[in-house]
Amino acid sequence: MERYKAGEGNGDSNCSTNYVTKETLLKSGKWLANQRMARKGIGTCKISLEQIPPLEELGVWSEQPYTWEEYYAFERYKTGEGNGDSNCPFNYLSKDVPALKLGKRLVHQRSAKRGRKDYKISVERIRLFKELGVWWEKDNYNYNISWADTFRALERYKNGIGNGDPNCPRKYVTDDTPPIRLGNWLHLRRDLLFRGDTSSFVTDNKLAVKKIRRLEELGVWCNIRPWDDCFHNLEEYKAGEGNDDPNCPGNYVTKGKLPLKLGNWLQDQRKAKRGSCKSTHKISDDHIHRLEELGVWWEQPDTWEKYFSALERYKMSEGNGDPNCSINYVTKDTPPLKLGMWLSDRRRSKREGKISSERVRQLDELGIRWEQPDTWEEYFSALVRYKAGDGNGDPNCTRNYVTKDTPPLKLGSWLHCQRSGRKGTRKRKLPVEHIRRLEELGVWWNRNNKGGTPQNLIYE
């Protein structure tokens, strides 16, 4: 550190964290950072009281000093690259010599303002940053932009690229100076309204209602419509797309001029009835009665019989007597059933003891296998045939090779898995006996060892 101060440091011993000496390649910067953390009691490093004075005499600072040079650097950024916005990105470096890590510095000031970590910030410094236009919370990116200015920007969006629709994407940012994160602002308004929090609109409730009405009149959909309006949409869904079933999917959105997340709303009604809704929403006995009359179910109905019947049909047709369909198999019913996924869930339920013995018996009688059968011998025999046929004496088929058997075997993919198993990169390691038989057949384990002798390959 003394040599650094006398040489590259130009009298300053505080080297950067990534500094490494040129002679001995010592990570001096990292070592110095550890000394500072040890003095603060952070991390596993320790520093004694005797070691602190020599560092201080050398000119090492324990807290990052804040200088007027940095303040003016923020001002230069604001009037230059920032286009009027002093909130630079985290990785921004100034063009000073040496360069100042302004972005990182700004993050530390915000952490200090929130009382996080060991950072400190004075009231005077907070005032200076506020005058520069720095925002302290992520949601307050448009710190000094009023509600009225943002609303006017939303009107301009609707009349311009929105083509009459004010509901801009969440990532949309205006071209104003400074830019306005309009999409994020609109998303936060919806979220606050959904939770019944109007504090961000204004403390006066009457004025808050006025602002909400202005958003709705502009065409913004907020998903806070009256309960009866949502119920009416559910009736329309039942009579139309639902085919007499009001239980729409959770991601269903209406197609009207003001879209409504009807599936999300219906899920909230179920949560409210169970008392598990995180929001302040409640559901009355009258609302429960009306939804039940419409045909809404509160708990997921048991679909065992429907899927079991589909599995029987699969066995008699496409399965050719075998009910064990693949995990991605989907029936041709209307609506289609994800039968393979359902069967996989039943196997997992049996392993976890969450399926009744009666249902296990039914599946056993149908011919369901609970564990994946050991097909190693089947694939090995196919590899032997490949070597004698298409391989012309070489068993190392390409990874995408598929046999012409019925059903076809993904032999190339299987061989790749054997190599991974031998290397120990898969959960199931390859037994020594399998390794021996594959090597005797002429299988190589690494591309670098093509043509190597099997005896040497096993000890690589």
Image: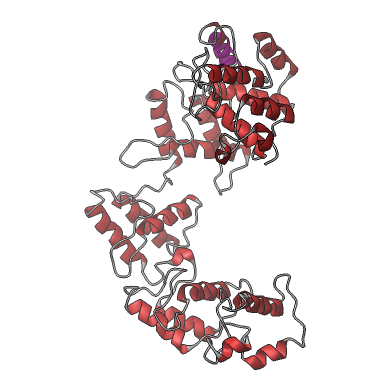
Q: Hey, which quadrant is residue 76 in on the image?
A: bottom left
**Is 255 placed left or right of 444 in the picture?**
left
Residue 191 on image: x %, y %: 47, 52
Residue 197 on image: x %, y %: 49, 57
Q: Quadrant of the C terminus?
A: top right
Q: Is residue 285 above or below residue 106?
A: above
Q: Residue at x 70, y 90 (%)?
A: 54
Indicate yes or no whether the magenta region holds residue 238. Answer: no
Q: Hey, which quadrant is residue 23 in on the image?
A: bottom right
Q: Hey, which quadrant is residue 380 in on the image?
A: top right
Q: Can residue 311 be seen in the rendering of this structure?
A: yes
Q: Can residue 298 be seen in the rendering of this structure?
A: no
Residue 142 on image: x %, y %: 39, 67
Main SS class of the magenta portion in the image: helix
Decide which of 377, 245 is in the foreground and name it. 377
Q: Quadrant of the N terminus?
A: bottom right
Q: Residue at x 44, y 66 (%)?
A: 140
Its colouring scheme is secondary structure
**Is 257 placed left or right of 431 in the picture?**
left
Bounds of the magenta segment: 303-314
Decide which of 425, 23 is in the foreground and name it. 23
Residue 146 on image: x %, y %: 36, 68
Q: Is residue 202 above or below residue 431?
A: below
Q: How many marks?
A: 0
Q: Is residue 263 above or below residue 195?
A: above
Q: Residue at x 73, y 31 (%)?
A: 432
